[in-house]
Amino acid sequence: METLTSFLNATGFALMEPGYLIMIVIGIIFITLAIVKDYEPLLLLPIGFGIIVGNIPHISSMALGVYDEGSVLYYLYFGVSQGIFPPLIFLGIGAMTDFSTMLSNPKLVLLGAAAQMGIFITLIGAIYLGFSPSEAGAIGIIGGADGPTAIFLSAKLAPHLLGAIAIAAYSYMALVPVIQPPIMKLLTTKKERLMKMKPPRQVPAREKIIFPIVAFLICGLIAPGSLALVGMLMFGNLLKESGVTERLANSARNAMIDIVTILLGFSVGASTQATHFLTPQSISIFALGAASFSVATAAGLIFAKLMNLFLSEENKVNPLVGAAGVSAVPDSARVVQMVGQKEDPTNFLLMHAMAPNVAGVIGSAIAAGVLWTVMVG
């Protein structure tokens, strides 16, 4: 009977607390959004199930959780906590990204840069709320809507906040179709949304091969802290554009990125144990993340409108394209296309929107490098 009683006291049912139940419900909500609403299912489903796994209570003498040294989850989480998985994700993104739309209309890069304003404005807000400069830098990067970058910077600047920041970043990435359209409609007129842009020029293969090399050199010299992210992004793109390493590019953009996404999403979810996650800081991080993402979207839209003041009529930019400056590739570009076509079904903005969208990926990585350099310098 003593053995039976000891076993029953060690079960998850006996150890269950309200916090664990709350997190399990949140995990189920994530899975539901992924399956029913199709909100970033490749991310939300692994994260959601990871949240459930990470919140099954167990006795302290058993090394089972992410934070228990020696457990399986501890070693899976090592790739997150040490910033290993994000550069590998960037390698796959580079191998599947076509920068030709950005190269054909370089001024749209400025929209990707403008959207990074959300990062730095939120950084100031986080410091005002009492976070340390390092914590504020890690929280601010949520505004880039780039989960891997948020994880990478959090692991360097505020590892104790990594779970909350990662969940916030991926949540807002998944909710791009919900968050961005109201802001886009609020800050643009119907006439602006109906604006058509001239087709992008054809970019020669040589230009697409030279770009990742030159871009990496410029970004790496400006912000050495971005070497791992931008380096892997441009290396993956060079594999794609060179024309001689198709097998490697194919592996990077398919099998490898899928494997890393599974491991990253699941282990990030498992890191959200109620004892570590359900804190006032986490609530503040989610609120700041929402503000950061909204400001980033608004900054891209407003900057597009400002650009048009200095552009000739045939070169004007549809302000909706500015919303794609956040790094949620390709969801933000798709939202621009969707909102534009609701106004005019013959207006195709997707290819134009991809330019600031991929520029935003580079911009958020550079911003992370700058913040890392400044905060540890």
Image (spheres, helix red, strand yellow):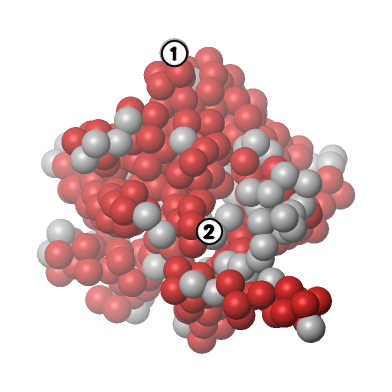
Hey, which residue is sitting farthest front in the picture? 2
Task: Indicate whether 164 appears above or below 312.
Answer: below
Query: x, y (%) of residue 263?
Result: 71, 57
Q: Secondary structure at mark 2?
A: loop
- Numbered badge on residue 377: 1
At label 2, which amino acid type do we have? Thr
Task: Indicate whether 76 appears above or below 205.
Answer: below
Of the pair 206 and 9, the residue shown nearer to us:
9
Hey, which residue is sitting farthest bottom in the picture? 36
Query: Which residue is painted at 66% across and 56% down in the image?
Result: 60
Query: Which residue is painted at 53% across and 15% down in the image?
Result: 221
Query: x, y (%) of residue 162?
Result: 50, 45
Q: Secondary structure at mark 1?
A: loop
Of the pair 39 and 105, the residue shown nearer to us:
39
Query: x, y (%) of residue 275?
Result: 48, 57
Residue 100 at least partly seen: no
Displayed quadrant of residue 320: bottom left
Residue 190 at least partly seen: yes
Q: Is residue 276 left or right of residue 267?
A: left
Query: x, y (%) of residue 199?
Result: 42, 55
Disc with the residue nearer the chain's start (1 vs 2) = 2
Q: Is residue 159 left or right of residue 204?
A: left
Disc 2: CA contacts within 10 A as few (<14), some (14-19) or many (>=20): many
Quadrant location, the N terminus: bottom right
Query: Which residue is painted at 30% across and 64% down in the image?
Result: 180
- Numbered badge on residue 272: 2
Query: Which residue is painted at 32% across and 30% down in the image?
Result: 132
